[in-house]
Image: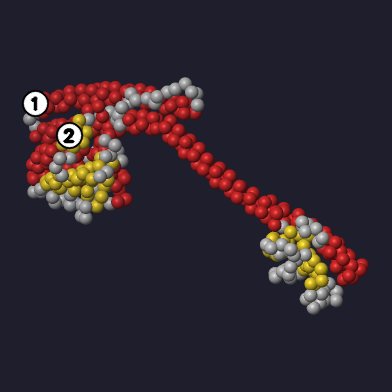
Amino acid sequence: MVLRAQSIANAEASAEIIRDDLRATFAQGGVRALSHAIDLRTERASGRAMMLLIDSTGRPIAGNLAAMPAGVSTDSDYRQLDVRRVGRPLPEAALLRLTRLPGGGRLISGVAYEGERLLLGRLERVSLAAMVLGLVFAAIAAALAARLIGARLRSTVTTLHDVRAGDLARRVPEDRSGDAFAMLGGEVNRTLDRIAALVGELKIATDGLAHDLKSPLTRMRVALERAAREITEPDAQDAMQRALEEGDRLMAIVETALSISRAEAGVGRDSFAVTRIDTLLETLGEIYAPLVEEGGRELMVDAQPGVTRAVHRQLLGQAVGNLIENAVKYGRGAIVLTLAEHADGIALSVRDHGPGIAEGQRAEALRRFGRLDAARQGSGAGLGLSLVQAVAHLHDGSVELGDAGPGLVVTLRFP
């Protein structure tokens, strides 16, 4: 576009020089002198100048244009028109302008533009082809670069995925190229080394904490049981029994808190085993059925048969058991365990027909030690749903609290 505009500007400047000369000739010698000057300028058929002098009646007097071109204007702009010169069979492009002369005559003057137009057309086609080729080469280069970057990053992503799945020994393959990807791989490996060390320390600490707490709590319970057998006063026996119950509750809280911490840290994935989830639910239904039936309610299991996954059987059973106990404690009506397998994984849910949990309180219910107002009057510690969420995290899954209409439905989703 810049070349075309510059070319037109140059051609118009040449045409304006010719027009000024012809106007000066007319001013000095009239129509006869102008006609003679036009004949001199148009003697060479190969010249660029294009002119036509017409008298007041419309009769051509001099010039090399075969006819009065349509569309020529008297304004200050030159018009690009296709015209035919005398003695030439084909029309050609020209920049022309009409000048009205005193006495009614008209002068059409300008320059041929066919050569420039053809050259510019070729240049534009070449430029367009070059641009298309450039875009093609750029797309190919971008695709190759993306493929190379993807290949370099794929090993890092795969390693991080395996680490998240529990393989804390996996590391990114390192090379000595010294580029940004090598530096990234080295930093990732050092970070994974630190994470593995911290997880190991956490496992040692939690195991030690469990042992250090459970041992004195166990001894305390034994001492309380011995003292309870020696006490004969009813009031003292009742107080001792409450102390034993609080001790059992404290031990359960410690066990649950440790289980949550270990599950959230990914400890326990080495104990995964392929398990029939439907069979596990049937077993849990048989275990918890007497507890549910004591309150005059029913526990039903609706499990799709043949659903298998690699899971931590003990923790998953504990999580589902917590949900059943919550449904017994806070729900009403029948309790239903369901299991279904979908294209994106499995969905395991526990449903009751109680008051449920308001949508605005569900995040608080899942928070560790989070307790709703209605639950604070009971014996719960606010860890049941936290354990369920930690177990889901251990299995790369999620927990959803929903409205059973009426009641609460808690759904665990595993890939």
Drawn side of residue 141 relative to residue 214, left or right: right
Rendering quarter of residue 36: bottom right
Query: In this orientation, which residue lies closer to the viewer: 333 or 137?
Result: 137
Up/down of 197 relative to 414, above or below: above
Residue at position x 44%, y 35% in the image:
147
Up/down of 30 relative to 199, above or below: below
Query: In this orientation, which residue lies closer to the viewer: 364 or 39?
Result: 39
Residue at position x 69%, y 61% in the image:
92
Residue that numbered label 2 is attached to: 275
Label 2 neighbour load within 10 Å: few <14, some 14-19, many 20+: some
Check residue 205 in the rendering and tell me which mark sits there, or answer none: none
Question: Closer to the N terminus: mark 1 or mark 2?
Answer: 1
Q: Callout 1: helix, strand or loop? A: helix
Instruction: Please name the colour scheme applied to the rendered image.
Output: secondary structure
Question: Residue most toward the bottom?
Answer: 57
Q: Quadrant of the C terminus?
A: top left
Percent across and percent down for residue 377 are 22, 44
| Mark 2 residue type | Thr
Query: In this orientation, which residue lies closer to the viewer: 98 or 364?
Result: 98
Percent across and percent down for residue 73 are 73, 69
Residue at position x 31%, y 44% in the image:
364
Q: Callout 2: helix, strand or loop? A: strand
Query: In this orientation, which residue lies closer to the viewer: 80 or 381?
Result: 80
Q: In this orientation, does residue 13 appear? A: no
| Mark 1 residue type | Glu
Residue that numbered label 1 is attached to: 230
Percent across and percent down for residue 68 are 74, 70
Residue at position x 47%, y 36% in the image:
144
